[in-house]
Image (tube, rainbow, N blue to C red):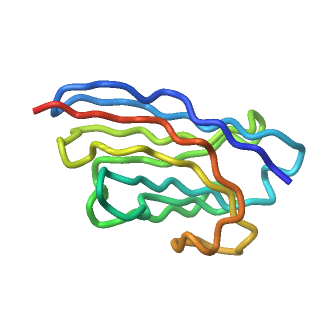
């Protein structure tokens, strides 16, 4: 079992950057694929990015590709989401999640563990 906690959300102007962190408890962090999802007000939660167990493979949604970068440090049990060139439409609660699925899971149903979320607000 793993527990997740996100950090780094906040208020930023359009065009700015934020770096989210997600710290995981437990000694089996490297056994999980890790993903980031987000949920904007009045919308369903959507996939943002994921990385495989080793961190070598990465996958992004089209809406963030080229602006966001996911990475992980297995020695620190932490996954990151670097967000650049932020837009008002990136405003959402951002969640990190852990999955036993091999490869690059992109569906919510493939993730068994979730953090509590962190708010990101981008002003225009």
Residue at position x 89%, y 44% in the image: 27
Q: Nearer the viewer, residue 121 or 67?
A: 121
Q: Residue at x 30, y 50 (%)?
A: 41
Whole-percent x, y for residue 33 in the image: 67, 61
Residue displayed at 47% across by 42% down? 81
Q: Is residue 45 left or right of residue 111?
A: left
Q: Position of residue 57 (x, y in %)?
A: 56, 63
**Which image quadrant is residue 74 in?**
top right
Reply above or below: 69 against 31: above
Quarter-of-image position of residue 5: top right
Q: Is residue 122 above or below residue 29?
A: above
Q: Which quarter of the figure is the C terminus placed in?
A: top left
Residue 69, image x and y in percent? Answer: 42, 47
| Pick the front one: 34 or 96 | 96
Which residue occupies the foreground of this view, 92 or 67?
92
Closer to the camera in the image, 61 or 123 = 123
Residue at coordinates 74% horizontally, 33% vertically from top-left? Answer: 76
Q: Position of residue 111 (x, y in %)?
A: 65, 66
Q: Residue furthest left?
A: 124
- The quadrant of the image that shows the N terminus is bottom right
């Amino acid at each position: 079992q793993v527990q997740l906690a996100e950090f780094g959300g906040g208020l930023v102007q359009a065009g700015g950057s934020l770096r989210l962190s997600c710290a995981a408890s437990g000694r089996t962090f490297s056994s999980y694929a890790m993903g980031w999802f987000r949920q904007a007000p009045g919308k369903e939660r959507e996939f943002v990015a994921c990385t495989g167990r080793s961190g070598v493979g990465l996958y992004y949604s089209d809406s963030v590709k080229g602006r966001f970068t996911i990475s992980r440090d297995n020695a620190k049990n932490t996954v990151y989401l670097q967000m650049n060139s932020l837009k008002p439409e990136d405003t959402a609660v951002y969640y990190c999640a852990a999955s036993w699925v091999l490869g690059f899971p992109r569906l919510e149903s493939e993730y068994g563990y979730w953090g509590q979320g962190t708010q990101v607000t981008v002003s225009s």
